């Protein structure tokens, strides 16, 4: 019974983090969607984002497992601190209205740069999760699923809603990561 509760807690944590990280793809997708994208481009861009949301946390988890061995008990505070800093960065970035307006995701290199920019946060979270030895397969599949899904939603909604919704989405994702960072530490 205790193992099942522990697994459900880990599942809930990973799903919430994956959704929070996907909010970055959602918010920037809205801005790109407002410029007009075809369905084929939505699928292609979202698939690349999903792939990057799998690769980046995978690299992060491997890095985090190594750092966790080196840091021992301090790893808990380091990983919580990383999540807090990442959450604060996402909140501040959304309030400043940052983003990649100059990137054209219709080109190959533009799409790669866009996917990397919305997935780089997943690396940092992966480092934190690697220090806690989270479930590797569950983590990367959840991150990939939510990164792809939220980018599709952002691109499609971008045609119909104002740009301010995207800024709030990124801020909300940052707040979730900040809260988990505090939970890891305390």
Image (cartoon, rainbow, N blue to C red):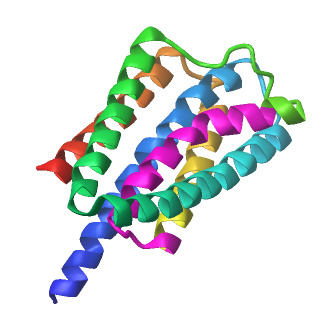
x and y percentages locating residue 22 in the rendered image: 51, 43
Q: Is residue 23 visible?
A: yes
Picture residue at 27% right of the left edge, 73% below the top:
8
Q: Position of residue 55 (x, y in %)?
A: 64, 56
Name the residue at the right extreme. 107
Q: Is 17 placed above or below 31 here?
A: below
Q: Magenta stretch: residue 125 in it?
A: yes
Query: For the view shown, which residue lies furthest in the front direction?
Result: 70
The image quadrant of residue 20 is top left
Asked where in the image residue 104 lies, by quadrant, the reply is top right
Compared to 58, does 180 lie above or below? above
Residue at x-position 39% and y-position 13%: 95
x, y percent for residue 112: 77, 38
| Magenta portion: prevailing SS class | helix
Q: From the viewer's perspective, is 94 left or right of 107?
A: left
131 or 137, which lies in front? Answer: 131
Q: Is residue 76 above or below residue 23?
A: below
- Decide if residue 139 is on the left or right side of residue 44: left
Query: Given the current orientation, which residue lies at the most extreme bottom position?
Result: 1
**First to last magenta residue range:** 111-137
């Amino acid at each position: 019974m205790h193992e099942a509760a522990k697994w459900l807690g880990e599942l809930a944590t990973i799903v919430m983090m994956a959704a929070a990280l996907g909010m970055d793809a959602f918010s920037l997708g809205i801005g790109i969607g407002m410029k007009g994208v075809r369905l084929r481009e939505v699928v292609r861009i979202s698939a690349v984002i999903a792939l990057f949301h799998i690769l980046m946390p995978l690299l992060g988890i491997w890095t985090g497992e190594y750092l966790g061995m080196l840091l021992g008990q301090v790893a808990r505070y380091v990983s919580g601190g990383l999540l807090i800093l990442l959450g604060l960065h996402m909140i501040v970035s959304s309030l400043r209205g940052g983003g990649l307006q100059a990137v054209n995701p219709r080109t190959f290199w533009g799409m790669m740069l866009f996917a990397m920019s919305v997935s780089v946060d997943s690396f940092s979270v992966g480092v934190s999760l690697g220090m806690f030895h989270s479930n590797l397969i569950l983590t990367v599949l959840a991150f990939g699923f939510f990164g792809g899904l939220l980018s599709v939603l952002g691109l499609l909604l971008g045609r119909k809603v104002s740009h301010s919704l995207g800024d709030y989405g990124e801020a909300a994702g940052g707040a979730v990561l900040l809260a988990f960072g505090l939970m890891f530490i305390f």
